Image: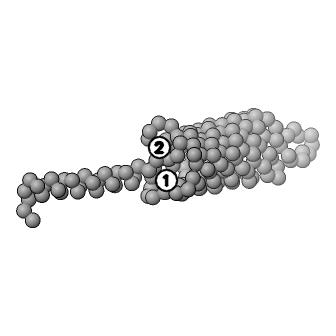
Amino acid sequence: MKLNKTNMKKILLVAALVMGGFMTSQAQEISKNALGLRLGGANGFGAEVSYQRAVGSNNNRLEFDLGWRNDNDFDAFKLVGLYHWVWNIEGGFNWYAGLGAGLGSVSDNRDFLNDNDPDDGAFAFVAGNIGIEYNFDIPLLLSLDFRPEIGFSDYDVIDNFAPDLAIGVRYQF
C-alpha cells in the first residue's frame, strides 16, 4: 500500500474511530440516583437503607446510609455519608473508593456484674470505602464493598477499628 495523502487520511480516520470507541467504552456513566439496601456489617449483622447521588460529570457520587447493627452484646444505629470516586473496569463492572464520616448511637446489652455501667450513648466515626459493583442493563446495581471505620466516643465499645464488609442491592433511576 502506497502511503499517499488519501491513505493517510483513511489511517487517521480509522485510528480516531478506534481510540474514540476505546475511550467511550472506558467512560461508562453511573446512574443519577440509586436507592436500596446494604447488608452486612462489622461487629454483628445489620442492614442499611442506602442512597447514592451522582455529582459532577466525572462519575463521582455521594452515598448516604442509615442503618442498624446488632449482636449479642450491642445494638447500634448509624448515619454515614461518603464521597465515592468511580472507575469503569470493563462492561458493567466498576470499582470505587471513597472517604466519609458518620454519627450513631449504641446500646450496651451485656449483663453487668459488680454494678458496672453499660456503655450507652452517641458516637462519631470516620470511614474509608473500597468496592466493586456490577451495573446490569436493567436498573439494578449489585455491589460488594469493604468499609473500615474508626469510632470515637467516651465508650470502650466504639473507640476501635471496625472492618465493615457488605453486599449492596440498589435500584437505579
Q: Position of residue 62 (x, y in %)?
A: 56, 39
Does 59 sit above or below residue 11?
Answer: above
Q: Residue at x 52, y 46 (%)?
A: 31
Kindly identify the residue that appears in the image at 7 percent across and 62 percent down: 2
In the image, taking residue 48 as reference, residue 54 lies left or right, namely left
Measuring from the top left, give residue 52's x and y in whole percent: 59, 43
Contact between labelled residues 2 and 1, with CB atoms less than 8 Å apart: yes
Q: For residue 94, which numbered disc appears in the image? A: 1
Residue 64 visible, this orientation? yes
The residue carrying mark 2 is: 59
- Residue 165 visible in the current orientation: no
Q: Quadrant of the N terminus?
A: bottom left
Q: Left or right: where does residue 162 sit relative to residue 3?
A: right
Identity of the residue drawn at 61% across and 50% down:
171
Asked whether, in this view, residue 59 is left or right of residue 45, the answer is left
Q: Please tell me whether mark 2 sits on a helix, a strand or a loop.
A: loop
- Disc 2 marks a residue whose amino acid type is Asn
Name the residue type under label 1: Asn
Q: Nearer the viewer, residue 73 or 52?
A: 52
Q: Quadrant of residue 160?
A: top right
Closer to the N terminus: mark 1 or mark 2?
2
Q: Position of residue 155 (x, y in %)?
A: 76, 37
